[in-house]
Amino acid sequence: MKKQKLTPPDVDALYELECVSQPIPWSKENIALELGRNPSFSFSWVGVDETGQWATYVLARQVMDELWILQVGTAPDFRRQGLAQELLSWVMAQAEAVVEIQKVILEVREHNTPAIELYGALGFVQEGMRPKYYPPVHPGAPRENAILMGRALRP
Ligand SMILES: CC(C)(COP(=O)(O)OP(=O)(O)OC[C@H]1O[C@@H](n2cnc3c(N)ncnc32)[C@H](O)[C@@H]1OP(=O)(O)O)[C@@H](O)C(=O)NCCC(=O)NCCS
């Protein structure tokens, strides 16, 4: 899989991928804000298949001594091929070049088993919980807890 760093001109294409990948997509404005931040602190990448199709993406940012994983998604047709795992590993490998970054953290819905399994496979462990943090995926359902996960950047 080819990896391409995301930049501000990628907003529209990334928004399309976001909409097919996420139950509650970020708005185009939020994507534009994220891709418009200081590129020195940005670790946002897309994985592209051999035909040029965008398959998987990671939005991540350095905040002080941490790498925050903000969003991860794989288009439905590309799932279970190891692509999110490959791209997340790539993003963390890029972050290893920045000596200040010590730790990687993220938040995930507590019922999002595929994502929790993915992060577990990459060595993330649960470090906390934010009760009722996420709005419901389905109208009328209760709000969902966030699980906070983290791992050291380097072994
Ligand atoms: C979670 C998500 C990003 C995984 O993407 P993916 O490219 O299919 O993941 P990978 O193929 O790299 O999976 C790597 C490992 O993660 C785990 N995993 C991934 N999907 C899984 C599933 N549906 N059920 C159980 N484990 C799963 C497995 O351990 C898998 O390894 P294996 O296939 O050898 O068993 C994808 O399902 C997705 O986009 N979901 C909707 C958006 C989302 O929930 N994003 C996370 C927000 S925090």
Image (cartoon, grey):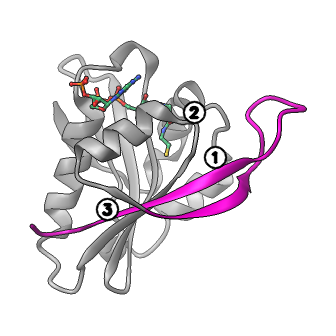
| Of the two numbered discs 2 and 1 in the rendering, the one whose residue sits closer to the viewer | 2
Marks 2 and 3, the one that precedes in the sequence: 2
Whole-number angstrom distance, CA of label 2 to CA of label 3: 20 Å
Task: Name the residue beneath numbered marker 1.
Answer: 26
In the displayed structure, 3 sits above or below 70; it is above
In the displayed structure, 153 sits above or below 46; it is below
Quadrant in which the C terminus appears: bottom left
Task: Name the residue beneath numbered marker 3.
Answer: 43
Q: Range of the magenta residues?
A: 127-155
Q: Who's the residue at 57% across and 33% down the image?
A: 22
Write down which quadrant ligand 1 falls in. Answer: top left
Looking at the rendered structure, the kind of residue marked 3 is Phe
Q: Quadrant of residue 51?
A: top left
In the displayed structure, 59 sits above or below 121; it is below
Quadrant in which the N terminus appears: top left
- Decide if residue 108 is in sight here: yes
Q: Who's the residue at 33% across and 38% down the image?
A: 118
Helix, strand or loop at mark 1: loop
Task: Name the residue beneath numbered marker 2.
Answer: 22
Looking at the rendered structure, the kind of residue marked 1 is Trp
